Image (spheres, coloured by chain):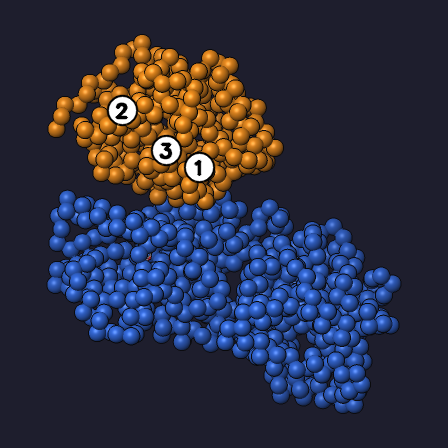
Amino acid sequence: MPDQPRFPYGEKDLAKFREAQQLAYHCAEQVAAWIEPGVTERQATAELRRCLVRAGVRDFFHVPFAWFGDRTAFRHFHTPLQFFAGSRVLAEGMPYVLDCAPVVDGYTADIGYGGKVGENPVWDLLAKDLRTYRELILREVRARRTLAEVYAAVDAQLAAHGYDNRHQVYPGRVIGHQVTRSTARGPAGVSLFGFGVRTLQTLGRELVKERLEGRSPLWAGGRASRHAPTPGLWAVEPHIGFRDVGIKFEELLVVTDEDAYWLDDDLPHVRRWALQEDAA
Amino acid sequence: MTGRSNGTRRRTVDSGGLALAVYEQGDPADPTVILVHGYPDDHSVWDDVAADLAADHHVVRYDTRGSGASGVPAAREDYRLELLGQDLYAVADAVSPDRPVHVVAHDWGSVQSWEAVTTPGAYRRIASYTTMSGPCLDHMGYWIRHRLRRPTPRHLAQLLRQGAHSWYIALFQLPVLAPAAWRLGLARLWPRVLRDLEAVRTRPGHPQATLAQDAVHGIELYRANMSPRVRAPRERYTEVPVQLVTLQRDRYVCDFLSEGLERWVPRLTRRTLNATHWSALLEQGPTVAAMVREFTARDHGALRQEPSATGELVVVTGGGSGIGRATALAFADRGARVVVCDRDLPAAQRTAELCELSGAKAAAYLVDVGDGAAVDAFAERVAAEHGVPDVVVNNAGIGHSGTFLETTEEEWRRVLDVNLWGVIHGCRAFGRLMVERGTGGHLVNLASAAAYLPAKRLAAYATSKSAVFMLSDCLRAELAPHRIGVSTICPGIVNTNITRTSTFSGLDDEALAAKQAKVSKLYARRGFPPEKVAAEIVRAVRTRKPVVPVTVEAKAARLLGRLSPALLRRAARIDAG
Ligand SMILES: NC(=O)c1ccc[n+]([C@@H]2O[C@H](COP(=O)([O-])OP(=O)(O)OC[C@H]3O[C@@H](n4cnc5c(N)ncnc54)[C@H](O)[C@@H]3O)[C@@H](O)[C@H]2O)c1
């Protein structure tokens, strides 16, 4: 077995990653405040992009996504093209998910934000239960379980909740992927198949390198994930669904040589859980 | 008899210029029930039912237009369903202006009440509807159309049978003859017709004195409505909770006429009564009253936002996971009230929570189905807290793999306790309650394709399941006269938790975990979701299907077992499972 690579980031780097993630969530919250019935997915992603660019973002790890209604649960998705924002119009009572990945000075954020307009009791329950997954994943990673084992633990929790695993619809069925500082020199802000050109360069290089080492920068349930998470940063995105409603968060998990922790706890969903706890 | 003299208050209600004779009993502060009679009766056909209900209901009856003491319209078109439906609203507005009413109807009364109940917005004025022996003519139009478009042997047989039962409708289209028959003697013969064909004892005051003229006027009901509605049916839905009481020995309306009624009536409860078309009202009035009472009580004050207060009651054992949970959810979606039990209480509670997301009422209980006393106590508790269930799904089960000689006595006992005794206890406790109630019901037992597919590694499991299969066959025969259906479900390979909890003879903990993981992966790859099994279970209850192999492998095995049992015997040697 080749040596585990050491944790590659210092405090300064982490602060930069944290800033990028804050910026991304901040934009998502702004769009969430702006969004209302009648808006289409395309309008929402355009607004999200505008917001990010206004904040100084020049490059994207991937283009912004928005899913409305049953598309939050990826129902009836058959081709990857269906991930792209479409003409679905937001209506009262619908859930929605925003997903964006700005790159700031080479520091990548990749976030997911779930919301609803009006009343939706299914969404409320899912949103409350999402917390279980954040805690479960951290616990399992800290115990140095393999990525495949964590994936299976998430699946078992989903079964107990009576939900289903929607991240399995993502290409490669991934629940997460590694995030690195991008040092590629391709054109910034240009994207191919929804991914920034620089992303593809970096990702391609990582895929080849990690493959050679018997590790995968992609986190799924299969053979390639039968190793503990490589020290570094992982964007983790449990996406859970019940019938026509889906919700996710996506944020960076820091895996150091001995430990693991979520990069930042000051995020919309974590604040919402704290509020609910206080209210209860 | 009783009703007429005992505090019956008479009044007249105007409906579009026609005077309707209305009869009231009971305390107007109690929930109002309007009883609508059929052809060729008048309000007095309800005497027994009304007398019983008056104890705790404000009971209202009226003579429908053209009968009894009500006005007789001049023209045929004045017998149109629209007007008949308006009559019901006129009476409801007069006797209960502020609160919605419960409607109970029989025969033509039921046909015309359907018109009122399927009028958009009906739920604002009608709290519940109990219907006997009278379909919605529009639904019937669609029913016929559907069968003509898909003329399978079964559909054709149904058309022919219902056609044969409707001979009098054709006769009623004859101009002079039909009225003449009533005038010239049929009216006088009617008590004998009721006695000989309908098992109704003759008694003073019945039938009404106005029978001959009522019968003649009423012929217009058929002439004005049958063919337009059946030929050009309208799409008629209703949100009103409906209780359909099928009379088992009805000579005029076949039970299969209500097949697929859920399409129009999402909040439907089905009941059966062992009675003829008229003996239901004239001989079993108190039983009918009890059914009405139970239904109106369920609904009491229920708002539209709480759809499940009147839905049928469904019990699912082992409802905390997999097929059981999916089945509970599927019934909840259809407006049922759901009770789940499991030996894992938090899991059952979770299922109840998910059911409530569909707006259903749900409850969870801790029960080990292998414990007979516990199941008896559970059944008693369900009956006391929720009522006698309409559907019971005996689903709790465990997986076990091991050859005959490998399997220890303890393992045998555990598998048989849950998989076989669990079903025995469930059928016994709930079957008895259903028989006592006397209005039918349905038991669903989860067997398996292993019930008919021998495999050397599934000795105990397959034995338990094949016992469930046979038990269900015997029980079905026994309960048929009580109108309690029994369905055996044989799922096949379904992606649930069962593989993660299955035990294997002769393996240590580590090997067991590995084996469980391996089998789980296999089942996951097959990818057949428990929701599809649940949909089949719901369908089996609706159509009273006796045996349901669900997946292709379950169907193929059943077929193969019939074509070549020897082949299956040989395949049983394969080291699988
Ligand atoms: N999954 C399949 O492929 C399959 C195939 C054929 C038949 N079946 C049958 O379907 C039924 C449901 O199985 P499933 O796949 O949903 O399994 P599952 O393990 O997902 O669910 C079974 C549930 O029953 C409960 N249970 C077990 N023993 C109990 C007991 N003694 N008392 C009360 N509750 C108990 C469990 O706690 C669990 O919640 C079983 O009878 C099983 O044999 C399943």
User: Which image quadrant shows ligand 1?
Assistant: bottom left
The residue indicated by pointer 3 is A238
Q: Earlier in the sequence, mark 3 or mark 2?
A: 2
Of A257 and B461, the residue lying toward us: A257
Q: Is residue B520 above or below residue B313?
A: above
Identity, as a three-letter code, of the amino acid under mark 2? Arg
Could you say whether the residue bearing mark 3 is in a helix, strand or loop?
loop
Could you say whether the residue bearing mark 2 is in a helix, strand or loop?
helix
Colour used to depict chain B in the structure image: blue
The residue indicated by pointer 1 is A81
Q: Which chain is orange?
A: A
User: Alpha carbon of mark 3 to alpha carbon of mark 1: how far?
Assistant: 21 Å
Tell whether label 2 touches label 1 (CB within 8 Å). no
Q: Disc 1 is attached to a residue of which chain? A: A
Q: Earlier in the sequence, mark 3 or mark 1?
A: 1
The residue indicated by pointer 2 is A205
Question: Residue at the location (61% across, 70% down)?
Answer: B144
Mark 3 neighbour class, 10 Å CA radius: few under 14, some 14 to 19, many 20 or more: many
Question: Residue at the location (42% across, 25% down)?
Answer: A191
Identity, as a three-letter code, of the amino acid under mark 3? Pro
The label nearer to you, 3 versus 2, is 2
